[in-house]
Amino acid sequence: AEWYSLDRDAQIELATNHLSWEKLMKWDFDMFEVSKLSNGRPLLFVGWAILASPHSQYIMEQTLSEGGKKGGSINNDNISSADRKGYKFLDIYKIPPKCMIDFLRGIEDRYVQDNPYHNNIHAADVLQTTHSFLEEMGGKYLDNNMKKESSASSTMTLQMFSILVGAAIHDVGHPGYNNAFQSNSFSQTALTYNDNSVLENFHTSLAFQMILGDNGNSDWNIFQNMEPNDFMKCKRLITEAILGTDLTFHFSNLEGVKNLVPSASRRDNDNDDNEDDYSWKVMSFLMHMADISNLGKRRAISTQWTDRVLLEFFRQGDKEKELGLPISPLCNRDTTSRPDSQIGFINYIIRPSFEILKDHLPLLGTVVLPLVEGNFHFW
């Protein structure tokens, strides 16, 4: 309904310059513009375009060819998926199109819009960035593996579905106050999860409660037709990926990626289990990096994210001061230096991580790291 309610100019702009398969793969993607064009629904539109591909692209093409009016429905009778690029998750896992749309709409509604940073725009951005990592920068490796088994039984397909769904839900319900605040304030969430990856556990639990509903009967249950064993694997992978976004584990996970043998040296390895383990470790770390990739984007986009994250941090610092709690790092508006905060994050987190990842995805060295260096020199 949201797509058909847009005016024709917005439909054309979105379909042509943002949500086509080719545009979705680009690193240079402006999620703020998509949010404006979609009337504040970036996660619904980007999630639909990625997770429902190539069906979603077909619907957009049909709409534009029919003058913006509601056209064909998404089904296998009016689309030849084999001739179109996309993940084909709706076909592989027998997900009703309406269910996918309802899932994305429901998840987006539970992101807190008043958060300057941890909101639906950030969720959509992490999803698109993860997709960009998978398809543009790791495309050849992933395509070669998916061609082996483009079916529900393919471990690679299940991993990709899991990591993309995980990206969409990874911060759902975020209150705008981080783990340190939760623990120091003895919040109910911190008490529930015993101060262990408090928000990451909360996001995962909330998302699955929403998706499954009572006895798996939710209208949002995108797993409803999945084989039980595949669902259990998918749930485990999604949980693992979201818990991996906790910065507490960044350096240990980075060390794990550092010790992996790059895929170029593994092509002749016949051990599928080793290949699957390798691909998942790289994918899950890529989603974590997508979550903190803002300083690897072009400056006009990156600085907007910097302003937003510091605004949210300072809001937390104000609340901590009000409650007499220790003020968390980077949350004191009176002492935090914007340039120093960004330079430090690049030096200690962003640059070292992408330097290691470029051994696995070489284009990171030519596309992302130059942008990181440009932002470093700017700050």
Image: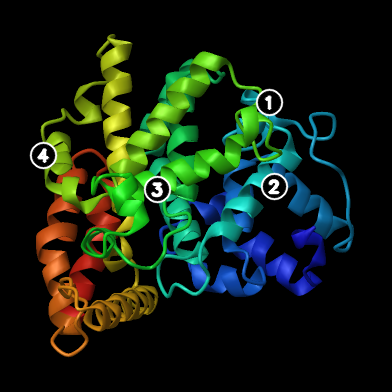
| Residue type beneath disc 4 | Glu
| Circle number at residue 229 | none
Instruction: Give the labeled residue for mark 4.
Output: 255
Do the residues under discs 1 and 4 have CB atoms within 8 angstroms? no
Q: Looking at this view, is 322 or 160 the one in front?
A: 322
Asked if 152 appears above or below 180 in the picture, the reply is above
Q: Are marks 1 and 2 in contact (CB under 8 Å)?
A: no
Mark 3 closeness class: few <14, some 14–19, many ≥20 residues within 10 Å: many
Residue 302 coordinates in the image, percent (x, y) = 34, 73
Residue 287 is at least partly visible in this image? no
Q: Disc 4 on helix, strand or loop?
A: helix
Which residue position is annotated with label 2?
A: 102
The residue drawn where x is 18% and y is 45% is 249
Q: Earlier in the sequence, mark 4 or mark 3?
A: 3
**To which residue does mark 3 refer?**
202
Q: Is residue 123 left or right of residue 272?
A: right
Disc nearer the start of the sequence (2/4): 2
The mark nearer the N terminus, 1 or 3, is 1
Mark 1 vs mark 4: which is more N-terminal?
1
Amino acid type of the residue tagged 2 in the rendering: Asp
User: From what the image shows, is residue 362 above or below residue 70?
Assistant: above
Of pointers 1 and 2, the one earlier in the residue sequence: 1
- The label nearer to you, 1 versus 3, is 3
Residue 172 x, y percent position in the rendering = 47, 54
